[in-house]
Amino acid sequence: MNILAQSLRLLVLAGSALLTAVTLHGQTPAPAAAPAPAEPTMEQRVADLEAYMNNAARTANVASKVAGPGPGHNGWMMTSSALVLFMTLPGLALFYGGLVRRKNVLSVLAQCLGIAGMVTLLWWAIGFSLSFAPGNPVIGGLDHMFFRGVTSAPSTLPWVSQNVFAIFQLTFAIITPALIVGAIAERMKFSALMLFVAIWMFVVYFPLAHMVWGGGLMAGAAGSIKAIDFAGGTVVHMSSGWSALVLCLIVGPRLGFGRTPMPPHSLVLCMVGTGMLWVGWYGFNAGSAGAADGIAANAFTTTTLAAAAASFTWGALEYIAKRRASVLGFCSGVVAGLVVITPAAGFVDATSAVIMGVLGGIVPFIFCMKLKAVFGYDDALDTFGIHAVGGTLGAILTGVFATPAMNPAIESVMKGLLWEQTKAALLTVVISVVATAAIALFVKATIGLRPTVEAEQEGLDLADHGEEGYIYEAKS
């Protein structure tokens, strides 16, 4: 009996072994687990820290003790993202809101809020991917749809999180179409503007962002057009400004334009908004360095100098022409100087920034105060005169004043840079003008651009939103 039991046991073991052998027959043995990276040497750890402090590429083949984003650089980029959002909400909203008539103040605030919400959803769903995922020279791919793969791991900026970089770029995507609001203020339906912006983002903004910053057609040394744009001269200000001109021409002037006085209802709000824009612009320009480093420090400096120089210049020109300098003039000069320095902020020195600021006070002043009246277009809040003219001027002057002494990364594109900047500016104008005309005509043919005459006379606050910005109680 014992012999029989042992025999059965041996048969079971043999069968099990045979079954295992058949199962494994023809299979490649599993590779041995890769050995864990060796602990870095002291020299490697020091090199890794030096790379972080200098915002340089991470040390290769080192088990970094700072494997995630660098705290300082990442912190500055989160702060910069908040500052750029602050430019739109509430900075631009108050700047524009103060310049319209009282019956339309809420419509401007609602347009800025509506754009912020809609563009954020578009950016999350597909906009970031079309702007920054690998693609062709004109548009990115779909790798990052719904923020797929956009985590807290380091991005193409070696010490900044992927999600922080994505949100930083989102704030640029929000403010760009919001700038267009200034040209069509007080006479475009809220629904029409939202539809226009939704299409415009796909046809104009996402392609331009990819072409300039996503490795596309105009991406410096990597592009066919070897232009440089530090923080958005072409992508943000030229695209919005030239689009604003076309849209305001298609929408048409405000009722009573040229016959009825339309003064700003609150220059106090305009001044407050201007201050917020100036403060937020440090995130816009210095944040575009992608780190809290020397390039950011230079952009911080040039931004300050250009804004101040342009504001003083605009006020001085007003004083010469009218024997008084207005608050609106100082505010307009601040924004014009900030626009002009934007594409050059990290590429030029302090003296060049002052020169650009002075020119930023002169040229947009001429367009806003003289040429607009000559041509008679109703650019209500001077979006074209400041952002298109200032952005184009800044893009061209970047080709004049940029120097590798301030940013060694541009050494390889210095030859013929002025011509490359000109080509990039011309292409941006063509894309913005043609696309805006097509989109505006489509919206006009489908849902219409303007409110009724009665609604425009009543004010868009009540007509579009059923609210009033200011309610006065009747005396009993």
Image (cartoon, rainbow, N blue to C red):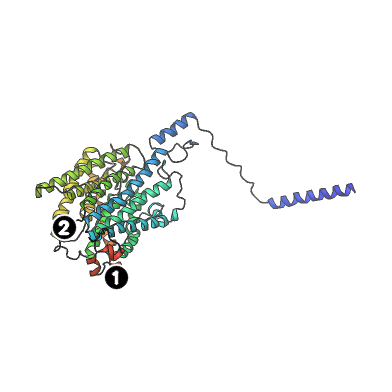
Q: Quadrant of residue 305?
A: top left
Residue, disc 2: 372
Image x and y of residue 142, in percent: 43, 56
Mark 1: amino acid: Ala
Residue, disc 1: 445
Residue toward you, 111 or 386: 111
In the depicted structure, whether residue 91 falls above or below residue 456: above
Q: Residues within 10 Å of mark 1 (few under 14, many from 20)?
A: few
User: In whole angstroms, how far apart are the C-alphas of marks 2 and 1?
Assistant: 28 Å
Mark 2: amino acid: Lys
Left or right, 454 with reference to 131: left
In the depicted structure, whether residue 90 falls above or below residue 295: below
- The quadrant of the image that shows the C terminus is bottom left
Image x and y of residue 140, in percent: 39, 55
Say whether marks 2 and 1 touch (CB < 8 Å): no
Tag 2 secondary structure:
helix
